[in-house]
DNA sequence: CAAATATATCGACTTTTCCCGATATGTAAA
DNA sequence: TTTACATATCGGGAAAAGTCGATATATTTG
């Protein structure tokens, strides 16, 4: 999922409800993941709590996008501690 | 353990049977880890199969050391894919 | 070769993680 | 304000990972 969210336009061409400025909504990710709605929702909330993604509620939808700065920090952390 | 093996001299001052050119023997790691011998042995063999450490049998002892090139490769992999 | 020591392997149990269905909550449309 | 839709939360079962004790294998020493 984190990989997919690198290029939302490419990986979620079916998302029509909105642009991608806030990322991708749960339903889209679920469809692509082939897991149940609850599983995907929980997984995304874990990633969010970890700070790797950010969520934006727009109407009934929740959009998730990568928090790139967190990935950069993580990358550096790994690079310097591995 | 991987962290410990970065600086064997520092982290395993009790190892007297040999120098550190081949790394640290299982018993030393076990003592420091506070886990059973079987657990540590299995864990080390997993790390070895993963290519992260290398083993050298010297007499009745098996020494393990980090495979730094594997860590570098992993670091780069993570950096470019994260 | 028998005993002692170091490590490896095996089978079982425990803990954690993964994933699901059911249900609750929040929002929009009729 | 009822209904429909999207997402979140909850409780539980299944799968995986972690850990152990018992035992096997390898090596050295007497």
Image (cartoon, coloured by chain):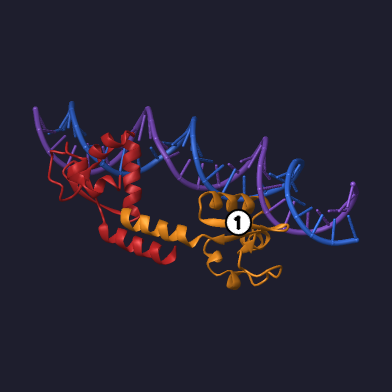
Chain colours: A red, B orange, C purple, D blue
- The quadrant holding residue A25 is top left
Label 1 crowding class (10 Å Cα cut-off): few <14, some 14-19, many 20+?
A: some
Question: Is A5 above or below relative to B7?
Answer: above
Query: Residue at 25% of width from left, 47% of height from top?
Result: A5
Q: Nearer the viewer, residue A38 or B78?
A: B78
- The quadrant holding residue A60 is top left
Q: Give percent across and percent down for residue A77.
A: 38, 64
**Residue B82 in view in this figure:** no
Question: Is B58 above or below relative to B19?
Answer: above
Quadrant of the drawing holding the N terminus of chain A? top left
Query: Residue at 32% of width from left, 33% of height from top?
Result: A34
Q: Nearer the viewer, residue D5 or B28?
A: B28
Q: Is label 1 in a helix, a strand or a loop?
A: strand
Quadrant of the drawing holding the C terminus of chain A? bottom left
Position of residue A64 in the picture relative to residue C20 (left or right): left
Query: Residue at 57% of width from left, 61% of height from top?
Result: B65
Which chain letter matches label 1? Answer: B
**Residue A1 in view in this figure:** yes
Q: Give percent across and percent down for residue A43.
A: 35, 44
Q: Which residue is mark 1?
A: B55
Q: Give percent across and percent down for residue A49.
A: 34, 53
Position of residue A40 in the picture relative to residue B61 (left or right): left
């Amino acid at each position: 999922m984190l990989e997919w969210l690198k290029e939302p336009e490419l990986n979620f061409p079916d998302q029509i409800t909105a642009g991608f400025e806030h990322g991708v909504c749960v339903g889209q990710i679920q469809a692509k993941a082939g897991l149940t709605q609850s599983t995907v929702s929980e997984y995304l909330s874990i990633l969010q709590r970890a700070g790797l993604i950010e969520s934006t509620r727009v109407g009934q939808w929740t959009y998730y996008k990568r928090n790139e700065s967190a990935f950069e920090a993580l990358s550096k952390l790994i690079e310097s501690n591995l």
